[in-house]
Image (tube, rainbow, N blue to C red):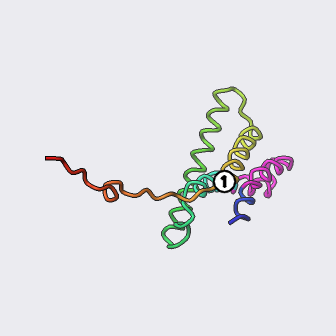
Amino acid sequence: MISLRWGLALSGWAALAVTALPAAHPLRVLVTAVFLLVCPGLAAVQSLRPAARRGRVPAEVLEAAVLSVVVSLALSVLVAEALFLGGTFTARWALLALAVLTSALALMPRRGRKRFKDRRATTAPIESKS
């Protein structure tokens, strides 16, 4: 799991680095497309899902994959929209913002979910003094 976290954290910086290649270079297109479609959403999904539920059932793996793509597209659109409204949109600025966001989400410390006890079951009933 640690290698996945570091891979996600470095993926945006790799996508940003390949922007030095010519515009239609196949490696640039492949790395950028994979990053934009998968990595920001996967970092967000992995940081929010409890570790106990990940990858137990094939349906959960498919759910995480679809959710990762949808969240990645949503984050990409939000970043692009913010940069367009600010009048500073370029592909490098968008990749930089998404790389920072992905790194922050991937390297964020994770905590297990605490289970809260039902207070009604643990407290004794109040007896009236009659």
Specify the segment rendered in magenta: 9-34
Residue at the spot of label 1: 109
Give the left or right position of residue 102, taking residue 120 as reference. Answer: right
Give the left or right position of residue 39, taking residue 17 as reference. Answer: left
The image shows residue 3 at horizontal and vertical percentages of: 73, 65
Q: Is residue 65 magenta?
A: no
Give the left or right position of residue 35, taking residue 26 as reference. Answer: left
- Judging depth in this view, the residue of 96 and 49 nearest the camera is 49
Question: Quick one: SS at disc 1?
Answer: loop
Q: Quadrant of the N terminus?
A: bottom right
Q: Amino acid at mark 1?
A: Pro
The image shows residue 119 at horizontal and vertical percentages of: 35, 54
Q: Quadrant of residue 61?
A: bottom right
Give the left or right position of residue 21, taking residue 113 as reference. Answer: right
Residue at 83% x, 49% y: name it: 17
The image shows residue 100 at horizontal and vertical percentages of: 73, 44
Helix, strand or loop for the magenta stretch, by majority: helix
Residue at 68% x, 54% y: name it: 106
Callout 1: 10 Å neighbours few (<14), some, many (20+)? few
- Vertical placement of 129 versus 113: above or below? above
Name of the residue lying farthest toward the left = 130
- Judging depth in this view, the residue of 108 and 86 nearest the camera is 108
